[in-house]
Image (spheres, rainbow, N blue to C red):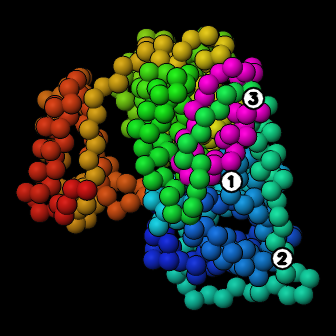
Amino acid sequence: MGKYFGTDGFRGEANVDLTVDHAFRIGRYLGWYFSRDHKASVVIGKDTRRSSYMFESALCAGLTASGADAYLLHVTSTPSVSYITRADDFDCGIMISASHNPYHDNGIKLINSDGEKMEEDFLLGIEAYLDSNDELPYAKDDAIGRTVDYAAGRNRYIGYLISLATRSYKGRKIGLDCANGSTWQMAKSVFDALGADTYVIANKPDGLNINVDCGSTHLDNLKKFVVENGLEVGFAFDGDADRCLAVDEKGNEINGDHIMYVCAKYMKEKGKLGDSKVVTTVMSNMGLYKALDELGIGYEKTAVGDKYVAENMRQNGHLLGGEQSGHIIFGRLATTGDGLMTAIKVMEAITETKESLCNLASGMTMYPQVLKNVVVTDKDETLNCEEVKAAVKKAEDELGSDGRILLRKSGTEPLLRVMAEATTHELCEEKVDAIIEAMRSAGKLIKVK
C-alpha cells in the first residue's frame, strides 16, 4: 500500500485528502504515460456523489491536456468500467467512487487494460509524480485529446449481464436496494428485462444520500421491505456496485460467505466447479470453511481485498472467490467483484434448484464474530508490540481450534482491526477487549471507533 493508493484506490474526504488538483495531475500522468507511442483512450465512470462530477471534469482536463481521449460512461458501476475497459480495448479505466463510504468521501480507482486493479508499480509511479514538481509536456494542436460521450458502453455492459441469466425470472418477486448509488437505474433495468416483478428502494440519489441507511452496509430497511412485501429475495448493493449482499424470504441476512457457499455448492452439483477451489480472504468465517469441508470443496485464503482474491484466482485458475463483505468474483465471467452479476448467479441457483435462498444457505452456520476498529499511535509499532503480541497469543491459545484471532491494518483507513471468532458472542467480546486493553496499557491506543 502506497502513500495515496490503498487496496482499493486513492480514497479520502473530497477536497481534503483527495483534491481536484490530485485528480487533474492523475489525469495528466495517465494521459502522458499511455500517449507516448499512440493516441491513448481512457474510459471513466462515476457514482452519484456530488463530488464525482467535479473529479470527472478534473480527470478529463488532465487526460486531454496530455493528449489522451476520455470516454465517459457517466453514472455507472465499477465492474462495468472493468468490463468495458477490457472489452473495448481501452488503455485503462477510471472509476470515481468511495464505494461504501459516506458521501463526503470519494476515490479514484484505476483499472488496467485487462480490466483488473492497476499494478502496484504503476501506482507508485503516479504517487512519485504527485509528490514531485515535475512538469509533463502538454499536447498541442491536433494532439490535444477529446471528451467522448460513451453511454453506449454502459448499455452494452447491461446487455452482457442480461445474457448471463439461464432462465426467465417471470413471476418472481425480487427486491433491490440500490444504495442511492451506481445501480439506481441499472439494477431495475436488468431485472425488469429478465421478467422479474421488481421492487426497488434507495433509488433516488441526490448527491448526498449515497449509502445513507441503505445498501450492503445497512440491511435493516431491505430486510423489512422483503418481509412486508412478501418478496422471494432481496439484493443490496454498495455505492459503486462491486458488492452484493442478500436477504432471504424470511428477512435473514445472506452475507458474502453465504453467497460463496451457495454458489460453490450449486456449481459443484452442476459439474461447473471441477477441481477449482474457493478463494477467500482471511476475514471469511470459520463456518464457511467447515461447510466447504463437508462438501469436499477446497479453499484458499488471501489478504483482505478483492484485488488479492482476483490475483489468486487468475494465477491458479480458480472459478469462484470473494469476501464476506460481498465482493464476489466469478472467474470466467469477470475480473473483479460485481454486485449485479452476483445477484444474477444467486438467482440462477434459486431458479435451477427450485429451492428458497433460506434453504440453500442453511447448510452453513456462521460462527459468532466481533470486530472492533481502533485508532493507535502507530499501526506497525502496535502490531510489533510485545505486550500486544502476548495478548493475541494468549487469546489464540485459549480458543484453540474452536475460534481464531485476527489483528490487521486497514487498507483504506488509518486503523487497526481486531477480530475474534468463537463459539459464543460473549467469548468473542472478551478476547477482543483483552487485546484492546493490552494496547491501552502499552500506551498505543488512542481510541476505539
10 Å crowding of disc 2: few (<14), some (14-19), many (20+)? many
Label 2: state its secondary structure. loop
Residue sitting at the far left: 441
Q: Is residue 177 left or right of residue 110?
A: left
Residue 256, above or below 444: above
Residue mark closest to the camera, 2 vs 1: 1
**Nearer to us in this view, 59 or 307:** 59
Q: Is residue 374 left or right of residue 298?
A: left
Kind of residue indicated by mark 3: Leu
10 Å crowding of disc 3: few (<14), some (14-19), many (20+)? some
**Nearer to us in this view, 314 or 84:** 84
- The location of residue 122, given as percent across then percent down, is 62, 64
Magenta segment: 167-194
Which disc, if any, is residue 145? 2
Q: Which residue is mark 1?
A: 76
- The location of residue 112, given as percent across then percent down, is 69, 56
Q: Which residue is mark 3?
A: 194
Give residue 69's quadrant in the image.
bottom right
Q: Is residue 134 magenta?
A: no
Give residue 165's quadrant in the image.
top right
Q: Is residue 408 left or right of residue 180?
A: left
